[in-house]
Image (cartoon, coloured by chain):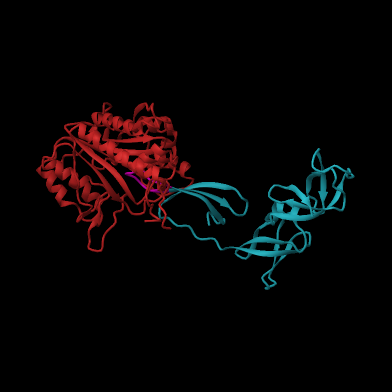
Amino acid sequence: MLENEPCSIIENEYVKPGKGQAFNRVKLRNLRNGRVVEKTFKSGDSLEGADVMEVDMEYLYTDGEFWHFMATDGSFEQHGASAEALGDTVKWLKEQDVYVVTLFNGAVLTVAPPNFVELEVTETDPGVKGDTAQGGNKPATLSTGAVVKVPLFINIGDKLRVDTRTGEYVSRA
Amino acid sequence: MWQPSAGRDALLARQNLNQTIRRFFAERGVLEVETPVLSQAAVCDPNIEPMQTSDQRYLHTSPEYAMKRLLCAGSGDIFQIARVFRRGEAGRRHNPEFSMLEWYRVGWGPQQLMQEVAELTRTLLAAGYPQLPVMTLHYREAVQQYAAIDVFVATDDDIACRGMQLAGQDLQLSRDGWLDVIMSHAVEPALPPDTLVFIDDFPASQAALARVEKNADGMAVARRFELYLNGAELANGYHELTDAAEQRRRFVAEAGNRPVDENLLGALAHGLPDCAGVAMGLDRLLMMVLNHTDISAVLAFDWARA
C-alpha cells in the first residue's frame, strides 16, 4: 500500500554509499490505474501489505453501470466491476468467458482478459475469395465493438481468435 | 541450488585479479598481511551493521582497525585482501560477504594515494578499458555541478528539500542522510562515463576515520576520497586521523551499544604514523572486468546459494 493505493513492486534497487545511509529505490505500479511511480525508502522500512486477491471469474452481464462476474470455484460469489476497473478489457468481454478479476478489499480493482478470445465479426467489407496468406488487410468490427485488422477473406459472421495483449487477429476460430 | 552463480571465466578473472594485485604491491615493497576476521570489538560506523557469532565475536566489516594497529606497531606500508561481512547489504552491487582490498601508505597524503589507486585500477581494468581518464572533483563541486546545490552554503532545509524531490517522499533524514540521497540519486548517475572519478574533501560531518582540515577557502573538510566508475563506488580512502583523543570522541559518539575497540585506541595513543589508506571493493572491480551488472555473477556462490 502506498498512499492508500494498492501497488505492486516492479523493481527494487538497493543503494548504499559505503559510508552512508542505505536506501531502496523502488518502482511501484499502481494496481488501480497502472501508473508507475519511483520512490526511495530507507532500507528496512516497511509498507503495509495490500489485501489484494486474484480470482478466476466468469462474465455474466452488464446492467449499464456495472459489469457482473461470478467466481468459477463453485462459490457462486459475484462482483460488479465499474467501467474504470474494467478499462480496455471491455473490448474483450464475452459472456461465459473466464477473466482474472483482481479484488482489493473485496471490490473489483482490475479485470484481465484471457490471452486469446473468440469473437464474432459484426461488420466488415465483403470477403475476397481465394485470398489467403498474402495481400493486405481490412478493419473488422467484432461483437464487443473492438476493431481489429483482419485478412481480406474474412466475412461477417466469422468467428475470430484474437490476441488480447496485442489486439491482433490470430486465426479463424 | 547447488550450482555456482559464477561461470568459470569469472573464477579465472578473480585469480588473475588477485595475482595482479599481489604483483603490483610486491613490486612496490608493500607488505601483505592477514588480520583476524573475528574480533572482540565492533565497527563503530552506525551505517554499517556487523554480524556477530554466538561466542560474542564480531566478523570484521573491513580490516581497518587491525591494520592500523600494525601500522602503529611500525609495520610500514601494508596491504590485505580480506573477506569482510556486512549485515543486510544485499543487492545488485552488494553481497553481505565480499572481498576487500585495503592498503596503507606511510608518509603519504591523499593526492599521492589517489594516484596509486588510479594506477592500480587502470592496471586491473586494462583489458576492458584501455583508455581510462582520471578526473578529480571536490565533493562541493560535484554536488554543485550535478545536483545544483552548494552544500557548504545550503541550509538543512535546502538540502532536505532537494533530497525529498529526489526520493519522492520525506524520509525523515538528517542532513547527512539527505546528502546521501543527493549523492546516490543525482550525482553518482550523472558522473562522466568510462572515467575514474575521484571525489574528495567531503563535508566534515562525513569524516569517519579521516582528518578534518581547513581547505583553501577556509572551510572544514574531511580529507576523504571516493572513487567512482560508471556510477559505482569502487574505493574509499582517508588521510588517516592520527589524533587518538579525537578518534575516541568520534567512536564514543557513534558506537551506540557496540563495544569500542580499545585495542585500536590504545595503538593510536601509542602513535599512528602519518599515513593514507584506502579500501577497494574487488567484486565490483570484477563486475567491470567482466561487464556483469549483477555481483552474483562474479561470486562462486552468492548469498542465496552460500
Q: Residue at x 87, y 53 (%)?
A: A157
Residue B199 visible, this angle: no
Q: Which residues are magenta?
A: A14-23
Instruction: Give the left or right position of residue B254, taking residue B180 as reference.
Output: left
**Is A173 or B222 nearer to us in this picture?**
A173
Instruction: Give the left or right position of residue B53, taking residue A32 as reference.
Output: left
Q: Residue at x 39, y 41 (%)?
A: B287
Name the quadrant of the N terminus of chain B: bottom left
Q: Position of residue A13 (x, y in %)?
A: 45, 47
- Report if residue A17 lies within the magenta region: yes
Q: How many marks?
A: 0
Residue B37 visible, this angle: yes
Q: Quadrant of residue B143?
A: top left
Q: Quadrant of residue A77?
A: bottom right
Q: Position of residue A76 (x, y in %)?
A: 70, 72
Q: Residue at x 38, y 54 (%)?
A: B303
Q: Colour of chain A?
A: cyan
Q: Quadrant of residue B107?
A: top left
In the image, residue A90 above or below residue A79 = above
Which chain has been coloured red in this picture? B
Q: Position of residue B154 (x, y in %)?
A: 37, 35
Magenta stretch: dominant secondary structure: loop
Identify the residue at the far bottom of this view: A75
